Image (spheres, coloured by chain):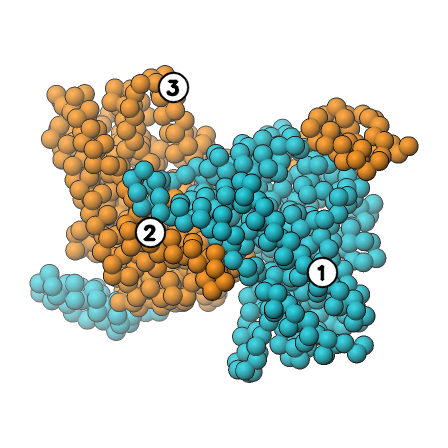
Chain colours: A orange, B cyan
Amino acid sequence: MVATQFACARPRLAARSAAQQHARRGLTVQCVAAPEQVTTKVQRNKNMGKLQAGYLFPEIARRRKAHQEANPDAKIISLGIGDTTEPIPPFIVDAMKAASEGLGTLEGYSGYGAEQGKPELREAICKRLYEKVGRKPNEIFVSDGSKCDIGRLQLMFGADVTVALQDPAYPVYVDSSVIMGMTGGHNGTGFDNIEYMVCRPENDFFPDLSKAPRTDIIFFCSPNNPTGAAATREQLTQLVEFARRNGSIIVYDAAYALYISDPNCPKTIYEIPGAEEVAIETCSFSKYAGFTGVRLGWTVVPEQLRYADGFQVINDFNRIMTTVFNGASNVAQAGGLACLQDAGWEQMLELVAFYKENAAILRKTFQDMGFTVYGGENAPYVWVGFPGQKSWDVFAEILEKCDIVTTPGSGFGPAGEGFVRASAFGHRGNIMEAVERFKKVYGKQ
Amino acid sequence: MVATQFACARPRLAARSAAQQHARRGLTVQCVAAPEQVTTKVQRNKNMGKLQAGYLFPEIARRRKAHQEANPDAKIISLGIGDTTEPIPPFIVDAMKAASEGLGTLEGYSGYGAEQGKPELREAICKRLYEKVGRKPNEIFVSDGSKCDIGRLQLMFGADVTVALQDPAYPVYVDSSVIMGMTGGHNGTGFDNIEYMVCRPENDFFPDLSKAPRTDIIFFCSPNNPTGAAATREQLTQLVEFARRNGSIIVYDAAYALYISDPNCPKTIYEIPGAEEVAIETCSFSKYAGFTGVRLGWTVVPEQLRYADGFQVINDFNRIMTTVFNGASNVAQAGGLACLQDAGWEQMLELVAFYKENAAILRKTFQDMGFTVYGGENAPYVWVGFPGQKSWDVFAEILEKCDIVTTPGSGFGPAGEGFVRASAFGHRGNIMEAVERFKKVYGKQ
């Protein structure tokens, strides 16, 4: 008889399975003792412990769910997370279908692609968006999205850099900085050792750079999420000059650039002379082609961008992309390529125009009701002021009274307090229904 | 006249574009001076500087390209990077096509999915592979692949943990540890402050745990890449007991588990009782369904796994996945779901069986020629010994004489010296052609 060391009591299923295996092999299983419960001796990463509650959007999803459960009949409309709702245009869908079909054939099959993206896609992105501002295909790294690229950029920079960001801002900049260890703990308002550059109506949503200290990294998003403010050429020139003077690196998030109408607002940071020596740009197909679930984006790292020791940043980013990433999905890349061909590009711009109409409708609604409203002209986000009120209270009130999910401004940073963000991503019918509900509740003020 | 600060000389294209914009707006552009060349003052991440040369596979690709350029007529066969070559089975392709098509319709469109993966996919993975060993759907995080998950796990653990890994091993474990800052510099053989657990024929490719020091994290891959060795139930029981005794966390890479034939080699670490308190498992559809380019994998973090302070690791991993990741591509997830349905599962296992036949052919070829060969029975990799020779020399010789790309064993760690890895991923015709070429050059020894 062979006595084994496998326990039978806990964990029950695993033990039973192991015991069965042995039984099948003709061994007799003897229950010796349940393994004692073990807690590892691994210390939790102290940076993870600094994070506050959940990431903003899961928290909103949680509250939405609770509201739905408490009000089973409520037809909740989401103007919350900026999630696309309209079908992907046919030219782009056809390319994805064809790519999927091809993977089932000997001729069309491909395995690992270049981690940096298909060469033809890098070229197409460059040609359509960056050639005229001097960028080259090898500087464009295709990815599964800007959010993920921001994480990889943080990993590349390491914990020893100092960081500034707009306040309010897309929460990933600050949360990934916390995770990577660039910040101190939370002080009740924000995190220590991070520079919050306040962007409020008073300063035209552009930081007062004359008072801003130098940091290594500056996260800057234009058109801005959440305020919808698009920086002008003059503002971005100031920003680039500030970075050049300080030897900083700007991480420029241009995920909404195609929503810009104002000809004085650049669609890429590289329209500003000298930006290529101080700026990385990240962008995405998510809000252009409805690729939020398909997952495709890119990051531009110019060859001219160098660390203090002269080392080219592009080489380190390439190493990151080849070591902890393995390329965006080939089907998504086929879709991205279609987005950049003339037919796909036109259909994509129509989609952007549709969401922009939504934004205009929402903007006008709030304006007509007497609210102070920002954004919504060069961005799919409308930023509505509720002076003197707490954002989360307004969020809760709108959810309660209108069955509408928005995003509380303070979720994007301390300077977002007193605002809520309304996203223009939605079916037209839902947007119109939301407008009616808003008017009913807030129309009299 | 308005003199602007935009330079006209360098960078030429950007400046011209800015100037044109101004001209259109009726401003006169005056060229003041070219901006001086700027190098940022950002210090390069010292961890990035510790990395050696390129990541292994891009380096091999470089050498292959050089060989092709020097020998334009050579018909190179790759048994190098483990890259799948056969079409994705029809049931799975159909699901991906349908998902793509659906994205073009109002009913079928979806935007952001849960960052952790579609609930039905998490359930299907659990049901097919983990239910019998006590795991639950909420413990399964769907991703764009194991390589990427390893990077995210490292980010979660942070720089302050100690790390052990098999030697030789998949290079991502060590490189991501270096990037994250867990290691010292390279000492000529390996990195300081990392525990290389030697796995050689002498110890049946299983580390001598009686001599291994405690570390926080233990990377363990079975069936192993590159040696092809699959750990037995007894060995894995030893490993789990070692981790439980030391309070370590095992990161168990099971990317090749379906290649296991030997009933005494577990297909998941959770077959070992008590593993759920000390082990994370990562796996992938890449080598099962030919998804190397489609990008889909998963990581299992049991609820029972806790840090020293009792905090559940699953909560931190969830935070990482929701903060610097945004879900795997919805088309890839539709494919993954099809893999787990009966029809897809059968077709997938046929594909695995095909590559296993390739492995058996390669294994026999080298054996017949008198080489000492390991692996190839429970894994798609054959590990061929060239005693007394340098792996990179053997790699170069095989490339030169046979026009065949292999992978030098030393690229996987110091203990891989004297071996090359032959991958069984290839069309049957190419495998047979490779066999003929090998026989011609090495058949006489």
| Residue picked out by circle 3 | A69
A392 over B215 or under it: above or below:
above
Q: CA distance from mark 2 to mark 1?
A: 41 Å
Give the secondary structure at mark 2: helix
Amino acid type for the residue under numbered disc 3: Glu
Q: Is residue B343 left or right of residue A126?
A: right
What is the x, y in percent for residue B352?
62, 53
Report in which chain the residue with disc 1 lies: B
Q: Residue at x 78, y 66 (%)?
A: B367
Q: Nearer the viewer, residue A271 or B406?
A: B406
Q: Residue at x 18, y 31 (%)?
A: A432
What is the x, y in percent for residue A340?
30, 59
Amino acid type for the residue under numbered disc 1: Ala
| Residue picked out by circle 2 | A93
Give the secondary structure at mark 3: helix
Q: Is residue A99 left or right of residue B295?
A: left
Q: CA distance from mark 2 to mark 3?
A: 36 Å
Amino acid type for the residue under numbered disc 2: Val
What is the x, y in percent for residue B13?
26, 70
Q: Please check whether the numbered discs 2 and 1 fall on a single chain.
A: no
Q: Residue at x 13, y 35 (%)?
A: A364
How many residues crowd around disc 3 within 10 Å: few (fewer than 14), some, or many (20 or more)? few
How many residues crowd around disc 2 within 10 Å: few (fewer than 14), some, or many (20 or more)? many
Task: Using the rendered image of the protein, determine whether residue A165 is visible from the camera's viewpoint.
Answer: no
Counting residues from the start of the chain, the first of labels 2 and 3 encountered is 3
| Residue picked out by circle 1 | B360
A172 over B73 or under it: above or below:
above
Residue that extends furthest to the top in the rendered view of this protein:
A70
Q: Nearer the viewer, residue A214 or A398?
A: A398
Report in which chain the residue with disc 2 lies: A
Image quarter for residue B358? Answer: bottom right
Q: Is residue B318 left or right of residue A76?
A: right
